[in-house]
Image (cartoon, rainbow, N blue to C red):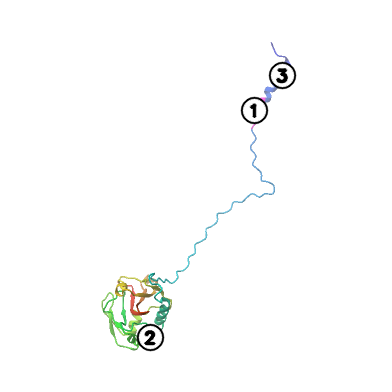
Amino acid sequence: MRAPANTRALALMACLACCALACTPAAAPREPQPTKGSATPATLPTEAQPALVTSAPSVVTVDSPSHADELPAEELTTTLRNALAAQDLGALANLVHPNRGVRLSPYAYVDPSDRVLTAAELRQGLQSSARQVWGAYDGSGEPIELDFKSYFQRFVSIPDPLRAAQSVDRALGGGNTVNNVPSAYPGARFIELHFPGRDPSLQGMDWQSVRFVFEKEGSRWWLVGIVHDEWTI
């Protein structure tokens, strides 16, 4: 049996409506909008790391921890600097051991044959023009035959002693010659003044050091050795 005409018409209209819905494209999703009155955050650049800042090294002073408070290093160092700068041998002579005198070594290796001066001889040294043998030159082996003033300027004093680096019981300079101060003066202390060199073409090989060796007797420290050191071959 055929359905009434109006029934067939309603069914056809419903079918067409379903087809129209199936063919309609989906709307694109909407991007979220900023809230009214707010600002979109800007992209910030990466923060640069601060450059490291290093300070210039200070004067090095190293004391032996076992008896660091015994040697009046600061007082003695001031006296030694001033004595070298002014060529004041009287100030040096006042420090010399009254019985043993002071041994002068032209190089780092202390030899028992190095010359020993009394306090009086050191005090009057600059006034003497007599030439003496003070050891042998490194490399050639020729005798170091000089008057005291020439020896002092070559093998005791160093350039600019008032601003030289300093250390206590530690060698700041070192070359090919063995530094035997600890074995030559057992139980002694030494103060070193060090000139690092100034000629760039020599790459630091024009450095010089002078070590003042002190031994304690009673309550006082006495100067018993002056040891020069420099670059040797």
Residue visible at 69% across and 20% down? 12
Horizontally, is 208 left or right of 132 in the view? right
Residue 54, percent from left and from top: 48, 65
Residue 193 marker: none
Q: Are marks 3 and 1 in contact (CB under 8 Å)?
A: no
| Residue 50 drawn above or below residue 75 | above
Element class at badge 3: helix
Asked whether residue 198 is in view, the answer is no
Q: Is residue 19 a member of the stretch shown in magenta?
A: yes
Q: Earlier in the sequence, mark 3 or mark 1?
A: 3
In the image, the segment drawn in magenta is 18-25
- Nearer the observer: mark 2 or 3; the answer is 2
Element class at badge 1: helix
Residue 127, percent from left and from top: 34, 89
Which quarter of the figure has residue 77? bottom left
Residue matched to label 1: 22
Q: Earlier in the sequence, mark 1 or mark 2?
A: 1
Residue 148, percent from left and from top: 32, 84
Q: Using a 10 Å C-alpha cutoff, classify the residue at mark 1 as few (fewer than 14 neighbours), some (14 to 19) or many (20 or more).
A: few
Which quarter of the figure has residue 72? bottom left
**Along the line of sight, which residue is nearer the eye, 52 or 213?**
213
Q: Main secondary structure of the magenta part?
A: helix
Q: Earlier in the sequence, mark 2 or mark 3?
A: 3
Residue matched to label 2: 90
Q: Using a 10 Å C-alpha cutoff, classify the residue at mark 3 as few (fewer than 14 neighbours), some (14 to 19) or many (20 or more).
A: few
Residue matched to label 3: 9
